[in-house]
Amino acid sequence: MNFYETPVTFALIALNVLVSVIGFTNAKFVEKAIMWPYGVKRDRQFGRFITSGFLHANWSHLFFNMFTFYFFGRNVEIYFSAYALGGAISYLLLYFLALIVSDIPSYIKHQDDSRYRSLGASGAVSAVVFAAIIFDPWSRIYLFGAVPLSAFLFAGLYIVYCIYMSRKSTDNVNHDAHLWGALFGLAFTLALIAVKSPDLIAGIVQELKNPSLFGR
């Protein structure tokens, strides 16, 4: 796959890198763009739902999100075009709506906490990963780069992990954004298929009837 096959994915990666790199050396820029529920509620700074999704805490955070997005995003961009699901427009809607939806639980939970901040593309990336899994549920994913799992099994474990870690709240990771981004990706893509290309549903169901625990 090259740039001309999946231009939206490459453009989003470039935008994430550009904004994040600026933020690495410009604290004032980060403060204006980061998700700050307190500021959103009191000053109606709704743009933070989008801008915060293009910031990252450090190079490793940026690399992990963009590495994941690179592999799954290209597939989803191609699927949305090949299966007449709205192409680039639907793909962009998936990404940007996921940024917003994945931050809503955090906004509700922390709207009166002036100290809370969050950033990162994880909600949108999770949505894209789960959208890709719908089309190829038994593809092989290597957990931690070594443990083979089917994408379907990975999805189940991922949701359980996000719920558990969200309730535990012992780290600085926004697990709510991961969870709701993933669930939104599933819901959006299934709804899109049902509306624009319902004939695909039979094929997806048939694929689910032929499971492979470790992927193929």
Image (cartoon, rainbow, N blue to C red):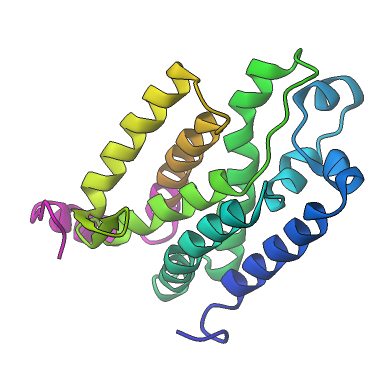
Q: Please state which of residues 119 and 83 is positioned toward the viewer in this rendering.
A: 119
> In which quarter of the view is residue 110 placed?
top right
> In which quarter of the view is residue 140 placed?
bottom left
| Residue occupying the point 84% across, 54% down | 25
Q: Quadrant of the C terminus?
A: bottom left
| Residue occupying the point 49% across, 34% down | 180
| Residue occupying the point 18% across, 52% down | 205
Please determine whether, in this image, residue 50 is positioned above or below residue 78: above
Q: Quadrant of the N terminus?
A: bottom left
Residue 198 appears in the figure: no
Q: Please state which of residues 82 and 150 is positioned toward the viewer in this rendering.
A: 150
Q: Would residue 212 be counted in the magenta stretch?
A: yes
Please determine whether, in this image, residue 110 is positioned above or below residue 186: above
Residue 50 x %, y %: 73, 46
> In which quarter of the view is residue 168 placed?
top left
Which segment is the magenta one?
190-216
Q: Please state which of residues 35 and 9 is positioned toward the viewer in this rendering.
A: 35
Residue 102 x %, y %: 57, 36
Please determine whether, in this image, residue 47 is positioned above or below residue 198: above
Residue 195 x %, y %: 43, 53
Residue 151 x %, y %: 26, 53
